[in-house]
């Protein structure tokens, strides 16, 4: 069986016209088996050393439930998922966390570098029950070469985020409660006015009809109808506000940052498999080059 030498050794030799048979190739490999094995073992030792000194990365994870006030899932979220993620990645939240990270690990990362390399913020929804509203959750992951640093920095980010967003929730809740109290008071005042109008109408109806009495009775009847309509509207508004408050959710920490003992490692199996094949091919290639020099075959320049 004859095959083209340049096809097999295109990166080593320069003869276009020469041909070599498979038996000769096998013979070259057999003669240089010790050399090939030695070179292969040296490369695998180097690879093992690289794996051993590969930087370890520890990831600490925390999770927080995002706040919402209302019944309509389109309008109840206090912050949209995109807004919440933007807040997490903002300087207001990350500044002190990055300073702590740099101090503990003696690094000099900027906020942008930290956000790109060490921070991961993900939003996901979870629906509990067929008729329940979808709940937004925020997952925060911080990676570093130290599990303690990852946990401390994650805790700093989580605390800063809650300190930033909680006042918005409290103010929104206060507005809803003030609206509810105002609606209840106005409804109560109208109900009193309605009772007064009913009492006056009753007295006018039972008394003798005087000049203009019929027109007063008609006016009071219209006033009562107006009061009833306003009271019904206020009652509906009160129910909506109470439902919104009943379905409200505060910012709630689902899981605090943990001290992670396991580190993320590279895909050792795939890397080993690929490097084994490459090492063998490289070792065999060196063997062919070595054999060429022995035979004093010129290499093309």
Image: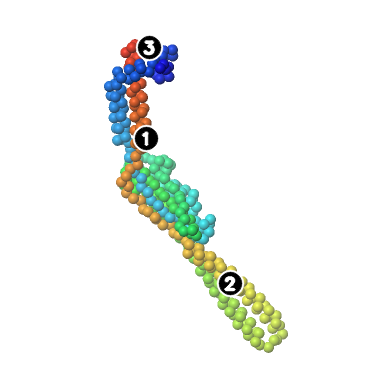
Residue 26 seen in this snapshot: yes
Q: Residue 240 appears at what percent x and percent y?
A: 53, 65
Give me the residue at 40% from left, 17% from top: 1
Whether the residues at callouts 3 and 2 have beta carbons within 8 Å, the answer is no
The residue singled out by tag 1 in the image is 270
Check disc 3: other Cα within 10 Å, few if <14, some if 14-19, many if 20+: few
The circle drawn on residue 231 is 2
Residue 235 vs 119, above or below: the answer is below
The residue singled out by tag 3 in the image is 298
Q: 16 left or right of 207? A: left
Among the two numbered marks 1 and 3 on one chain, the one whose residue lies closer to the N terminus: 1
Q: Residue 289 appears at what percent x and percent y?
A: 35, 17
The circle drawn on residue 108 is none
Quadrant assignment for the C terminus: top left
Give me the residue at 32% from left, 31% from top: 47
Circle 1 SS class: helix
Q: CA distance from mark 3 to mark 2?
A: 105 Å
Q: Nearer the viewer, residue 157 or 37?
A: 37
Residue 104 seen in this snapshot: no
Check disc 2: other Cα within 10 Å, few if <14, some if 14-19, many if 20+: many
Q: Nearer the viewer, mark 1 or mark 2?
A: 1
Q: CA distance from mark 1 to mark 3?
A: 38 Å
Q: Nearer the viewer, mark 3 or mark 2?
A: 3
Give me the residue at 46% from left, 59% from top: 129
Q: CA distance from mark 1 to mark 2?
A: 73 Å
Whether the residues at callouts 1 and 3 have beta carbons within 8 Å, the answer is no
Circle 2 SS class: helix
Check disc 1: other Cα within 10 Å, few if <14, some if 14-19, many if 20+: few
Q: Nearer the viewer, residue 182 or 15?
A: 15
Circle 3 SS class: loop
Q: Residue 25 appears at what percent x and percent y?
A: 36, 18
């Amino acid at each position: 069986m004859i095959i083209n030498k340049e096809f097999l050794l295109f990166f080593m030799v320069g003869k276009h016209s020469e041909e070599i048979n498979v038996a000769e190739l096998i013979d070259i490999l057999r003669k240089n088996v010790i050399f090939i094995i030695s070179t292969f073992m040296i490369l695998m030792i180097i690879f093992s050393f690289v794996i051993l000194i590969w930087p370890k990365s520890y990831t600490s994870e925390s999770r927080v439930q995002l706040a919402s006030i209302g019944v309509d899932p389109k309008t109840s979220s206090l912050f949209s998922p995109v807004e919440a993620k933007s807040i997490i990645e903002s300087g207001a939240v990350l500044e002190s966390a990055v300073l702590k990270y740099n101090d503990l690990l003696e690094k000099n990362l900027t906020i942008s570098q930290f956000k790109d390399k060490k921070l991961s913020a993900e939003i996901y929804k979870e629906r509990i029950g067929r008729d329940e509203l979808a709940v937004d959750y925020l997952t925060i992951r911080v990676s570093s070469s130290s599990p303690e640093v990852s946990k401390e920095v994650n805790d700093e980010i989580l605390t800063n985020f809650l300190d930033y967003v909680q006042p918005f929730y409290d103010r929104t809740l206060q507005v809803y409660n003030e609206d509810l109290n105002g609606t209840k008071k106005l409804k109560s005042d109208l109900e009193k006015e309605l009772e007064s109008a009913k009492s006056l109408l009753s007295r006018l109806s039972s008394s003798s009809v005087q000049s203009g009495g019929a027109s007063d009775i008609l006016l009071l009847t219209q006033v009562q109808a107006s009061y009833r309509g306003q009271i019904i509207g206020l009652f509906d508004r009160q129910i909506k506000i109470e439902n919104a408050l009943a379905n409200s959710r505060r910012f709630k920490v689902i899981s605090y940052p943990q001290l992670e003992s396991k580190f993320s490692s590279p895909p050792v199996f795939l890397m080993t498999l690929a490097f084994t094949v490459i090492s063998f091919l490289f070792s065999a290639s060196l063997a062919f080059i070595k054999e060429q020099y022995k035979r004093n075959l010129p290499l093309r320049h």
